[in-house]
Image: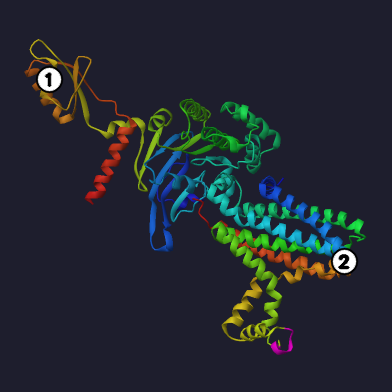
């Protein structure tokens, strides 16, 4: 019913749809406004894990809160299972972890999960079973009877994941799920998200920790200043981000490593070889020069670009384009 | 249990576990001991004195709870962001507001009922038989606290915690003056033929016409009229009380509270939870 209002032709299999979503916040004393989201559009298929990445203040949390019906958009359409999130029943299929979770501190972990389960219309017996299993899975079962005021940031984060999953939702919306966790905690939560994916759940999570996004996500949506910069699969994002090539040269009888370093001062030396990162169109010239001076061309390859590098480059491009226009 | 019931019980337990409640219980004990000791100097008036102090303590301690919890309940939830995980559940916003209000109402009922029982136990050895009048007076205090709680829930939704506390206190005090204000602004009120002091006569004259008159008239209709639920004098003088008076007061309080909570729901439903 609600699909008829969409500006895009979106496939039936889509579970989450953002269509030209705008959000403008009034500033102090109503003298101005801040455009937090500017026509955000993307969609998620069932069973997909999408990392929503961007700088602080890019609009990630606003987008997620709009998806949960916590914030109303100024314009645009958001659908979960073809239903707007303001319809409360749709949230029965959604589990949500807010950024820096803060819960009722006088409750114990088990009491808190019971409350969340009851608010999700679960039966008491089911809540207890599910809560115990989740606390065990997230390695906080030993503190299930402790009040939350004594919980560390990492423990609260794990409990936050547990409450998001208590009613076994189809869609998990996690705002910085790996924040505040130690390396072991990060691995644990990462594994929990991977398990959710294996069991067919759809996961949308925002993150600053891009190395984790690389390990978990199928797809990355990059947002900057309220605008979607990129919506691509991980490999596509890495490939399209650069047209660079790595050339590894080795010394020979006619030329030493020192001379190679002196000739191309933008390269780096490692393990008796000298590596240059050059653009596609410079490649031919570099090889010709190297061969002419008698250097050994050991390897030519596409450098592995981390998601972080790709993201930084995208942001820089965006800032540059913004400056030009 | 329904969603509203679950939220009400959660809110009830949360308030019950706070330091404020322990302070209230300790203060109530001190007041009651004071009432017993001081009654020895009020020869022949012991029952009346203890009743007055007991009923006054119910109201004062109830107001402390309303101010410290009710007037900050929603703003605190929003500020601490505990509201996010609750509203992300399949619940409606009105259920959250009503649940919070009912939790507060339940705590106040517990307070008034407990103090009523304690007061009755103190009155028995003094020769006072706690009757319907005392029960009506306690019920009147509860109805008054109910209205102030509803106003507190509304103000906590509209402003910062400090401002919400100030507004709630002003409404509480204004509510006690509502009948007087109405009387002073009535056309037929003869300022020279009353028991007013000269300075109060001048103020009353000022309220007969002009903007001050309309300001107070509007204020009268907006503020809860605590006179409708004030049954204290019946208990203090051990006078019989008409059931209809209690019934009208009860209906007035419930309707006033419902309107205030409905307004709070209307505001809360449109709020962005950032």
Q: Nearer the viewer, mark 1 or mark 2?
A: 2
- In the depicted structure, whether residue A16 falls above or below residue A26: above
- In the depicted structure, whether residue B209 falls above or below residue B82: below
Residue B192 on the magenta segment: yes
- Residue that numbered label 2 is attached to: B45
Query: In the drawing, does residue A286 fall left or right of residue A214?
Result: left
Q: Position of residue B137 (x, y in %)?
A: 81, 64
Q: Nearer the viewer, residue A53 or A199?
A: A53
Q: Nearer the viewer, residue B4 or A109?
A: A109
Q: Position of residue A84 (x, y in %)?
A: 52, 49
Identity of the residue drawn at 59% across and 78% down:
B215
Query: Mark 2 falls on what kind of element?
Result: loop
Query: Mark 1 falls on what kind of element?
Result: helix
* Residue segment shown in magenta: B190-195
Its colouring scheme is rainbow
Q: Nearer the viewer, residue B117 or B51?
A: B51
Q: Quadrant of residue A24?
A: bottom left
Q: Position of residue A142 (x, y in %)?
A: 62, 27
* Subunit that carries the residue with mark 1: A
Q: Quadrant of residue B178?
A: bottom right
Q: Position of residue A251 (x, y in %)?
A: 14, 14
* Subunit that carries the residue with mark 2: B
Query: Does residue A86 show up?
Result: no
Identity of the residue drawn at 38% across and 36% down:
A220
Q: Which residue ends up furthest to the front in the rendered image?
A: B41
- In the depicted structure, whether residue B44 falls above or below residue B205: above
Query: Does residue A263 show up?
Result: yes
- Residue that numbered label 1 is attached to: A260
Identity of the residue drawn at 27% across and 45% down:
A319
CB-based contact (under 8 Å), mark 1 and mark 2: no
Query: In the drawing, does residue A285 fall left or right of residue A134?
Result: left
Q: Which mark is residue A80?
A: none
């Amino acid at each position: 019913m609600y699909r008829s209002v969409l500006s895009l032709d979106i496939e039936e299999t889509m579970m989450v749809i953002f269509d030209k979503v705008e959000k403008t916040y009034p500033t102090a004393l109503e003298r101005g406004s801040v455009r937090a989201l500017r026509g955000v559009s993307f969609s998620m298929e069932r069973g997909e894990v999408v990392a929503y990445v961007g700088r602080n203040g890019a609009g990630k949390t606003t987008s997620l809160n709009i998806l949960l019906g916590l914030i109303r958009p100024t314009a645009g359409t958001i659908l979960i299972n073809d239903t707007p999130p303001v319809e409360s029943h749709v949230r029965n299929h959604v589990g949500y972890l807010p950024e820096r979770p803060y819960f009722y501190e006088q409750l114990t972990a088990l009491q808190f999960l019971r409350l969340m389960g009851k608010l999700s219309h679960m039966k008491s017996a089911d809540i207890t079973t599910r809560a115990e299993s989740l606390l065990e899975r997230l390695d906080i079962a030993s503190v299930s009877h402790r009040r939350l005021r004594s919980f560390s940031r990492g423990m609260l984060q794990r409990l936050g994941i547990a409450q998001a999953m208590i009613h076994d939702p189809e869609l998990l919306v996690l705002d910085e799920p790996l924040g505040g966790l130690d390396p072991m905690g990060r691995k644990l939560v990462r594994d929990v998200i991977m398990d959710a994916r294996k069991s067919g759940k759809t996961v949308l999570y925002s993150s600053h920790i891009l190395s984790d996004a690389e390990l978990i996500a199928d797809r990355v949506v990059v947002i900057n200043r309220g605008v979607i910069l990129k919506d691509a699969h991980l490999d596509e994002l890495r490939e399209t981000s650069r047209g660079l090539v790595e050339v590894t040269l080795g010394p020979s009888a006619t030329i030493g490593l020192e001379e190679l370093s002196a000739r191309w001062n933008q390269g780096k030396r490692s393990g008796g070889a000298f590596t240059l990162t050059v653009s596609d169109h410079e490649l031919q010239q570099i090889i010709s020069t190297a061969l002419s001076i008698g250097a050994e061309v050991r390897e030519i390859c596409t450098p592995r670009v981390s998601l972080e590098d790709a993201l930084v480059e995208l942001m820089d491009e965006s800032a540059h384009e913004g400056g030009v226009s | 249990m329904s969603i509203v019931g679950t939220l009400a019980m959660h809110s009830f337990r949360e308030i019950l576990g706070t330091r404020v409640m322990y302070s209230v219980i300790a203060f109530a004990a001190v007041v009651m001991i004071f009432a017993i000791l001081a009654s020895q100097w009020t020869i022949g008036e012991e029952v009346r004195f203890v009743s007055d102090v007991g009923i006054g303590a119910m109201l004062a301690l109830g107001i402390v709870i309303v101010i410290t919890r009710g007037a900050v309940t929603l703003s605190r939830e929003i500020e601490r962001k505990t509201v996010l995980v609750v509203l992300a559940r399949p619940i409606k916003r009105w259920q959250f507001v009503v649940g919070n209000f009912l939790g507060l109402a339940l705590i106040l009922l517990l307070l008034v009922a407990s103090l009523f029982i304690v007061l009755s136990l103190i009155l028995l050895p003094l020769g006072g038989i706690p009757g319907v009048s005392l029960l009506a007076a306690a019920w009147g205090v509860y109805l008054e606290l109910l209205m102030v709680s509803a106003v507190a829930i509304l103000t906590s939704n509209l402003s910062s915690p400090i401002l919400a506390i100030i507004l709630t206190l002003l409404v509480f005090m204004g509510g006690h003056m509502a009948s007087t204000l109405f009387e002073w602004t009535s056309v037929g009120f003869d300022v020279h033929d009353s028991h007013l002091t000269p300075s109060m006569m001048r103020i009353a004259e000022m309220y007969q016409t002009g903007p001050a008159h309309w300001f107070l008239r509007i204020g009268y209709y907006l503020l809860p009229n605590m006179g409708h639920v004030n049954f204290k004098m019946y208990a203090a003088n051990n006078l019989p009380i008409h059931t209809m008076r209690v019934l009208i007061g009860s209906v007035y309080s419930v309707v006033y509270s419902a309107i205030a909570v409905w307004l709070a729901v209307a505001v809360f439903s449109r709020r962005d939870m950032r």
